[in-house]
C-alpha cells in the first residue's frame, strides 16, 4: 500500500493469505487496546500500530474499520444511565461522568496515535480513506466524524501559519502546488514560476505538524483593473508589471490540498488574512476581488431544460445546442447573440436558484458566506474547455470590501440576502424568470 | 487587571461601579453567543471578547464563570432523550446526535475564542484562574474540565517541539526559566549562565502557539559518576568539565511552567526524548539518573510520630528533635548517628508507604510511573534549608535504563511493583517496620 | 595566555624556558613559510600556526613580530628595479610586476592565515596586540598597517549586516554589549533590558566571519522632544512610552567593539542606515539627533587656564575651582552662574577650537564629518561623575537632517564650515573670544 | 544592457547618439573621482555610478575601461621616487609611502563601488566583461588584475559558506544549477530532482554578499563500488538506494559558476570540506573518488598524429578513423580492439604528456594538485557524444585518500611526481612510448 511511504517504511514481503490479514488486524486492534490502557504518554505502541496499519490492503482496512466502529463506541447501557442521572440532576459531577462515558474511546485512541512521529499525517490520511468509502459503509461515518471532530480542533486557525509561497519556497512544497492545484492546472515549473513572479502572490496555510504540506493555498494576480477574464492572468508569457502600481488584487484560484481535512473551514480566514497582508504591502490597492468559475450553471440549465413543465424547455434546449460546436465563441455574431441570452440566465442562476436558503452554486455559496458581494458576470471570462463546459465560458467577480464583509456576512447568514451590484440584479430581471426558488 | 498585559493592552480607566461590571459581563456573554452563532471562522468577536475579559476584576470574573457554568452546559432534557435513543438503538446516527447534544457549548466557544491572536495563551490563563479558585467554587469544575479536555488535546505530544536552551536562547525565554524554576531556584543571570555551560544541558518543550513560553523544562548535568549530592551541581563557581568524557547524565531539575496546563502530562516524554538526544550527542554516556528531592519524608515522619499508637512515636519524636538545631549536619558524630537511623526509615517510606496503590511520595510516583528504578538514598544530598526541612537533607537517585523503562513501567502500573536496588530494599528491612501499608 | 580561548584550546603546561620560546617562534615562522609556498588553498598549516601563536607569551610575540617585520617585507633591490622599469615605461606588464614585488609577503600570509577556522578573529586580535604596543615598537607599524589594509577591505560595508538587538537577541551577544558599552556603562541585565524595551532601539553591525561579535552598536531612545539630558534616557525605572507616538529618535550612545578594527570606519554608515530603518518603522519621526558628550571641554579649559599668556587665566582658574565641590550643581544659584559663564566658552570650544582644520573635540569631529549639525548645548545634560568631569555636565545635540547631511558633509570636508544653530553661534560670540584657532 | 537587471533597473529609453554615450562615460568617470575624494563611507555616488554603468553599451564600456586604465594607475614618477627611497632606506615609513603610491587608485575605487547595494555582484560582472575581451585589449589586463586581487581577497575561504543543496533548497538557486552545470548537463527539473535524492549529495559554496548565487558546486553519488561509468549515475530513472549502506562517494561533477571569479581557487577546499561532511554523516564510506572526463586526450592524439615525425602518425590516424562511425562502441569486437590500443595511450597521456612540469590534461592537473591519485582508466565510461568526442568515451577515477592527500600534494607540487595505481603505470608502459615530455 502506498501508505507506507508516509512513514518512510520500506516494506519487505506482503500480506499473503487472508489468514495473515486477519492476524494483522487482530494485532492492530490489540495494539489499540494496549495504547488505551497506558497511563503515560509513551509513544511506542502508537508507532507499532502505524507500521502495522500502513501494511493493510483494502480487506484489512475494511475489517479494521468495522472493529473500530463496533468495539470503540460508547456503551449504550452506561450512556443511558448517565443520561438519566444528568436529566434528573444536572450537576457538575453528573456532567463529568456523562461526558466521560459518552465520548467514544476511539477519540482518546486517535489522540494517542497522534503522538507517534508522523501520526497527524496518518490520521489525516485515515480520514481520507474513510471519506472515500463513506458511501458503501454508512456505519463508518461515526469513525470519520470522530476524526473530523479532532482534526477540526487541531487545525484551529490559531495553529495555522500563513506563509508566502514564492521562488524562494522549497521545491518540496512547490511540487505539491503543481500536484494539487485544481481550479486552473499548473503546466509544469515554467508555468509555476510565472505564477510566483513580482506581480503575483501566492500564500498558503501550514500546520507545524505537517511542515512540508500546504493545507490550502490561494493565488493572486496584482493588476490595474478588475479582471474580466482569467486566461490573461494564466498566460506564462505575459509581461511582469510593477506590483507597486497595481490597484486590484485578483484572487483567481483557491485550493484545498488535504482531502482528509474536507469540511474543516480555512478559506474565509485565508482570504481575509491575505487581503490584510496585501493591503500592508501595497497601500495603493483599492479592489480585492475574485475571478471565479460558476461551476453549476450549465448543469442547472440542462436539468431545467429537461424538467417537465420547466419554464422554457424548448428555448433552453436550443440555447444549449448552440454551445456544442467546438470554439463556437470565435464566431463573433453567435457569441454576441448567446451573450444576450445567457448572461441574464446566469445572473438569475446566481441570485435566485437556491439549495435550501443558499445559492445552488457552490462557489457563490463560499464567497457570499465570507461576506463578498457579487459584482459582475464576465462573458467569455474562461474559454478553456472546462470553462466552456461548466458555465458557457462565463466567470463571476466577487468583491471583498473589507469594511463590508462582516455586515454582508451577517445579512447573508441571518436574512439570506445576497449583496450584488445593481447591474447583476437588472440582468437577472431581464431573464424574465420569477424569483421563485428552485429548491432541490 | 494584570491579564491585560497578555494581549498587549494599555488600559485606561477601570471598571468603576458594580453596575458597570454587570454590564461588562453581560456584554462578554453576548459576545460569546454571537461567536457561537457565527457559521464562519471569523475572529472579530473573539478578539472583542478577550479585550473585555482582560478588564475583568475578581467580581466580574466570578460572575462570568457562573454564567459560563449555567448557560453553556448541555440541556438535561435533550441529553436524556438522546441517551435513551442511543440505549434503545446504538446506531451511528443516534451516536452522532448524542455527541452533538452532550458536548457543552462551552467547548465550541473555547475553540472559537482560541482563534483570536493570543487566544491560546488566554485560555491557559483562564484555566489557571479557575484552578486557583476551585476550592471555593465547586461548580466551576465543569468549566475547568472542559478547558482541560481541550488543552490536553491541543498540547498533544505531536504538537510540542523540543528545543535546547543555552546561551544562544533569547533572554525573553531565559528570564522565564529564572522565574519558573521551582526545584532549585536560579539566583540571577550568573547562576543561569553556569547552568547552560558546556557540561550542562537544558531542554524545554515549546508549543507553536506560545512561541516564547517554555511549557516544561529539564536541567541536566554531565558528570563522571552518578551524583550523590546536588549542591556541587548547582555551584556557580564549579569548573566546567569536558562533556565528551562524561559517563553520567544527571537530571537534577524538572519544572512545569504553566499552571494553566496542570495535569497535562509532559514529563515522561521530555525525559525520554532528552535521554535520546543526549545518547546521540554523547555516545559514552552510560547512566541516566536523577538526583531528586524526597519532599514528603519529614512530613510523614512527623505525622506518624504524632499518631496515636504509631509504631514508635517516642523514638521518632526524639529523632525529629535532633534535626532542629541549625546546621546540625556539621556535627560529624551526630550526623553519622542520624544517618544510621534515618536512611532505613526513608527507604521504608519510599518503598512501602502508599497512597492508594502508589507511593505517597509524589516525586517517587512520577519517576516510577515513567519506568525509572529507585537506585540509592544519599545522606546529606541536599543541605539547603528546604532540603533539610523536607527530607533531613536526603536525596534519591532514580535511574532510567532505557531498555528497562517500558517493562518497569508496565509492572509498576499493573502490579504496583517498585523496581529498586537491593541495597535500598535491605535498608528498608533494617527499619524493622512491617510491610503494611500506611494508607491515607 | 588568554588568547587560547579564542580558538577553544585547552592548554596543558606552559612554555617554560626562553629556549623553548625561541624554538616555538622558529616553528611559527617556518609554518608561515610553508603556508606561503603552498599553491593550494589548504588550511592545515594555518590552523597549526594559530595553535602555536595562541601559546605565545609576551616575549615570543615580540620576537615573532620582529621577524614578521624583517623577513616578510618587500626586497628593496627588487622594488627599486621594478620602480625604475615602471618609471621608464608605465606599461601594464611593468605595473603588474611592480605590484607583485611591492606587496609585503605578509599580506598574502595574512590572507592564508585567515582561511583557518577562527582566522579572521585571530587576525583582528593580532592587530589589537600590535596597536597596543605601537608606541614601544615603531617598526611594527608596517605589520599593523598591512593588517589594517586587509581588515578595511574585508570589513567593507557591503559585507556587514545590520541586525536589530533586542530581548530576543542571544545573550552570547548581549553580554558583549554589557562588556563593551563605554559611553554610558550598562549596569547589569536589568539596565540592559530597559535599554531594549519598546521605546528604545539598538542596532549593530555584524560580520559573517564573527557571528557572535558585534562590530559596532548604537543605542536609540524614541521620545517626544529632542532630549536635553541623558540621565532620563538611562533611568532603568522610567516608564515605557508608545514608540509609535514618538517624534524624536535620540542616538545616545555609539560604541566600537573591536579594538583590533580601530580606524575602520563604520559609524557614519551605521547612523545613516539606522535612521533609514527607523524612518520606515515610525513614519511620525521628525528629528534624528544625538545627545552627545563633549569629552575635551574641561581638559581644554584647564590647559588654557595654565598656558602662559592665555586669554583669561585667572578667571578660568577660578571658574574651574567652582566645579570642584561634589554635587555643586545642586546649588541652584551657583549652577545658574556657572551656566552663564561656561556655556559660551563651550560653544566657542566646539565651533572655534581646532586641531588642524577640524574641531579639537573628537565627538564633534565625528558627527560633523558625518554631515550632522551642532544644534544645542545642554546645561546639566549629564550629571554623572564622568560627565561632570569632562564637560562640567554639559552635553551637545547634533542633528541629522537626512536631506542635508550630504551637503553639510561636503562643506565641512572641503571648506571646513561647521553647520550650527544660530543660538550656538551667538553663544560663542558671547564668550568674547576671538575666532582665532587654538592649534595644537 | 542586460546588466541593468542585476540592480533591478527598469530602463526607459536608450543611449541614442555616440555624443550621449561620451557624456555618459564622462559622467561615470566623474562619479568615480567624487567617490575617491569622499572621506566618509557614503554610498550614494557608488549607486549613481552603477546605475550609469549598467546603461553602457559596448562602445561606452570600452571607452570607460580605457580611461580606467589610463587615469587610475599609479604615477610613474612618484613610484620611481618612492621606490628609490625604499631601496636606499627600507624603513617602515618609506615602505608605507611606497605602498600608498604604488597601489592603483582603481583598487580603492573598486572597494568604494563595492559598498553600494549589489556592488559585489556588479564587480564580479565587470571582471567577467574584462576577461571576455582580454584578447583584444591587452591594456585592460591591469584593471582585470586589480579586480582579481580584490575578489580573491574577498572570496577568501573564511568568508565562504558551505551549504547542502537538496529538494529543500529554494528554486532561485536550483535554477542556477540547471543553467550552470557544464560537465554533465541537467535536463530540466526531473533530472535535477534525481540528482538531489537520498543517495545523491550536492554541496555549494556561497558568499554572504551574493546570497542566491552558488559560487561553485559539486555533485556526489553514494554507491557501493567505485563507479567505472558515469551514465548510470546520471540516469534519472535509476532506483534510489539507501545511502547509509554506501561504501563509495563518487564526485561526478564540479562546476565553477561565476565566470567573473575565474582563477580564484575554490575546488580543492570544496572537495575536502565535502569529503569531511560525508565522512561524518556516513561512517561506512571507504572510498572518495571522482569519475572524471579526460578532456584533452583525443585532441592530443589528433595533434600528434598530424605532427611531422610524430611517434606513429599513420597508426594513430587509422585509430582515430575507427572512432568516426556513430555509435561505434556498440560493435563489441571493434570496441575490444580499440580498448586494447587506446587505453595504454590514454594512460601515457595522463602520466607523461606535460605542459611545463604538470600534465597537459587540465582535469588531471586539478585533481593531482589537490592531492588525489590516478586510480583507474575506464573504457566506455562516458558514451555521451561529448564524452566520445573528447576521450573516445574513456573516463578516469581519481581517488582522494584523506590521509594521503597532503603528502601527495607536496610531492606533486615539489617533485612533480604523479601518484598512480600500478595498473595505470603498467598500461602506460604498454603504450611503448618513451617517457619524454611532449612540451607545448
Image: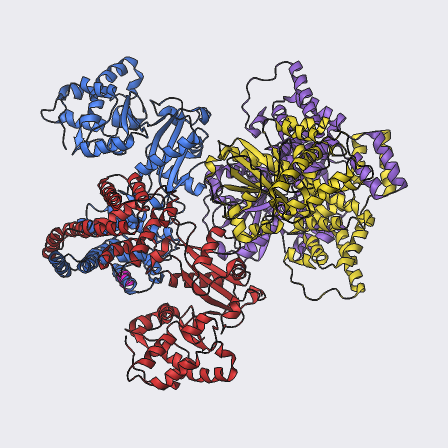
Chain colours: A purple, B yellow, C red, D blue
Residue at 42% from the left image edge and 30% from the top image edge: D200
* Residue D427 as seen in the image, left or right of residue A413: left
**Towards the viewer: B253 or D287:** B253
Estimate the x, y position of residue D90 in percent, counting from the top left: 15, 56
Residue at 33% from the left image edge and 52% from the top image edge: C124
Above or below residue C61? Residue C228 is below
Above or below residue D79? Residue C63 is above
**Towards the viewer: C125 or A176:** C125
Residue B407 falls in which quadrant of the image? top right
Residue numbers of the magenta segment: D27-33
- Residue D6 appears in the figure: yes
Estimate the x, y position of residue D257 in percent, counting from the top left: 33, 41
**Is D436 in the magenta?**
no
Number of numbered discs present? 0
Estimate the x, y position of residue D360 in percent, counting from the top left: 20, 31
**Towards the viewer: C408 or B209:** B209
**Is D31 in the magenta?**
yes
**Towards the viewer: A129 or A79:** A79
* Residue C415 as seen in the image, left or right of residue D352: right
Residue D22 falls in which quadrant of the image? bottom left
- For the N terminus of chain A, the image quarter is top right
Estimate the x, y position of residue D35 in percent, counting from the top left: 30, 62
- Residue A359 appears in the figure: no
* Residue D315 as seen in the image, left or right of residue B209: left
Magenta stretch secondary structure, dominant: helix
- For the C terminus of chain A, the image quarter is top right
Amino acid at each position: 500500500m502506498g501508505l507506507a511511504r508516509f512513514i518512510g517504511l520500506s516494506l519487505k514481503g506482503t500480506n499473503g493469505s487472508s489468514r495473515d490479514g486477519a492476524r494483522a488486524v487482530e494485532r492492530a486492534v490489540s495494539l489499540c487496546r494496549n495504547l488505551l490502557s497506558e497511563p503515560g504518554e509513551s509513544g511506542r505502541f502508537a508507532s507499532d500500530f502505524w507500521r502495522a496499519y500502513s501494511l493493510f490492503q483494502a480487506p484489512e482496512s475494511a475489517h479494521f474499520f468495522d472493529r473500530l466502529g463496533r468495539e470503540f463506541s460508547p456503551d449504550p447501557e452506561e450512556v443511558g444511565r448517565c443520561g438519566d442521572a444528568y436529566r434528573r440532576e444536572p450537576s457538575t459531577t453528573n456532567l463529568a461522568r456523562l461526558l466521560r462515558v459518552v465520548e467514544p474511546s476511539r477519540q482518546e485512541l486517535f489522540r494517542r496515535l497522534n503522538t507517534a512521529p508522523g501520526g497527524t499525517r496518518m490520521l489525516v490520511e485515515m480520514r481520507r480513506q474513510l471519506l472515500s468509502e463513506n458511501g458503501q459503509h454508512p456505519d463508518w461515518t461515526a469513525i470519520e466524524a470522530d476524526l473530523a471532530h479532532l482534526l477540526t480542533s487541531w487545525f484551529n486557525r490559531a495553529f495555522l501559519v500563513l506563509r508566502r509561497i514564492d521562488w524562494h519556497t522549497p521545491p518540496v512544497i512547490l511540487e505539491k502546488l503543481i500536484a494539487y492545484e485544481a481550479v486552473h492546472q499548473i503546466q509544469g515549473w515554467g508555468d509555476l514560476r510565472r505564477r510566483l513572479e513580482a506581480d503575483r502572490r501566492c500564500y498558503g496555510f501550514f500546520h507545524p505538524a505537517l511542515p512540508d504540506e500546504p493545507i490550502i493555498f490561494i493565488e493572486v494576480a496584482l493588476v490595474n483593473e478588475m479582471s474580466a477574464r482569467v486566461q490573461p492572468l494564466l498566460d506564462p508569457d505575459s509581461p511582469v508589471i510593477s506590483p507597486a502600481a497595481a490597484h486590484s488584487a485578483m484572487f483567481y484560484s483557491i485550493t484545498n490540498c488535504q482531502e482528509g481535512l474536507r469540511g474543516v473551514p480555512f478559506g474565509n480566514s485565508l482570504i481575509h488574512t491575505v487581503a490584510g497582508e496585501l493591503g500592508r504591502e501595497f497601500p495603493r490597492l483599492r479592489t480585492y476581488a475574485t475571478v471565479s468559475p460558476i461551476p453549476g450553471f450549465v448543469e442547472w440549465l440542462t436539468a431545467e431544460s429537461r424538467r417537465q413543465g420547466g419554464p422554457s424547455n424548448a428555448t433552453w434546449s436550443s440555447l444549449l445546442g448552440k454551445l456544442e460546436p467546438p470554439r463556437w465563441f470565435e464566431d463573433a455574431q453567435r457569441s454576441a447573440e448567446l451573450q444576450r441570452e445567457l448572461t441574464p440566465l446566469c445572473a438569475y442562476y446566481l441570485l435566485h436558484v437556491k439549495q435550501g436558503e443558499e445559492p445552488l452554486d457552490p462557489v457563490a455559496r463560499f464567497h457570499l458566506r465570507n461576506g463578498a458581494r457579487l459584482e459582475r458576470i464576465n462573458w467569455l471570462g474562461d474559454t478553456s474547455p472546462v470553462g466552456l463546459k461548466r458555465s458557457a465560458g462565463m466567470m463571476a467577480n466577487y468583491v471583498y470590501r473589507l469594511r463590508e464583509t462582516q455586515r454582508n456576512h451577517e445579512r447573508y447568514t441571518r436574512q439570506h440576502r445576497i449583496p450584488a451590484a445593481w447591474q447583476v440584479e437588472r440582468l437577472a430581471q431581464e431573464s424574465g424568470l420569477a424569483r421563485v426558488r428552485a429548491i432541490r
